[in-house]
Image (cartoon, rainbow, N blue to C red):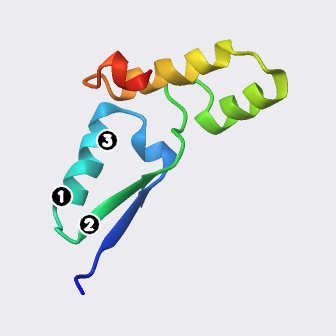
């Protein structure tokens, strides 16, 4: 059986397109790395971490928080179309 490596990247290491590209290159560097797990995004430009935003959403039921999470994702992954984000 072929060995498979699961790569887990923390939230603070996925807060810019450049850092995501770095993680992509690390993953592609070894063919055994076939699965990627990414934590919720860390702080970006002083904004709250995704985890904190999701906690706020659960506590307040303020649906505008979803827009904050999605807008952060759009900044981090600018080449992904809006349709893929929903």
Which numbered disc covers residue 33? 2
Q: Mark 3 touching mark 1, by CB under 8 A? A: no
In the rendered image, which residue does mark 1 sit on? 28
Which numbered disc covers residue 43? none
Distance Cα–Cα, label 3 vs label 2 = 15 Å
Counting residues from the start of the chain, the first of labels 3 and 1 encountered is 3
Q: Position of residue 69 (x, y in %)?
A: 55, 24
> Residue at horizontal 24%, vertical 42%?
21
Distance Cα–Cα, label 1 vs label 2 = 7 Å
Mark 3 packing: few (<14 Cα in 10 Å), some, or many (20+)? Answer: some
Q: Is residue 13 above or below residue 52?
A: below
Q: Position of residue 7 (x, y in %)?
A: 37, 63
Q: Quadrant of residue 75?
A: top left
Q: Is residue 13 above or below residue 1?
A: above
Q: Residue furthest bottom?
A: 1
Counting residues from the start of the chain, the first of labels 3 and 2 encountered is 3
In the rendered image, which residue does mark 3 sit on? 20
* Tag 3 secondary structure: helix
> Residue at horizontal 50%, vertical 22%?
70
* Tag 2 secondary structure: strand
């Amino acid at each position: 059986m072929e060995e498979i490596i699961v790569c887990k990247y923390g939230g603070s290491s996925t807060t810019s397109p450049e850092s995501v590209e770095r993680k992509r290159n690390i993953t592609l560097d070894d063919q055994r790395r076939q699965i990627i797990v990414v934590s919720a995004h860390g702080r970006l430009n002083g904004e709250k971490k995704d985890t904190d935003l999701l906690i706020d959403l659960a506590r307040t039921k303020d649906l505008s928080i979803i827009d904050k999470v999605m807008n952060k994702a759009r900044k981090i992954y600018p080449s992904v179309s809006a349709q893929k984000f929903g």
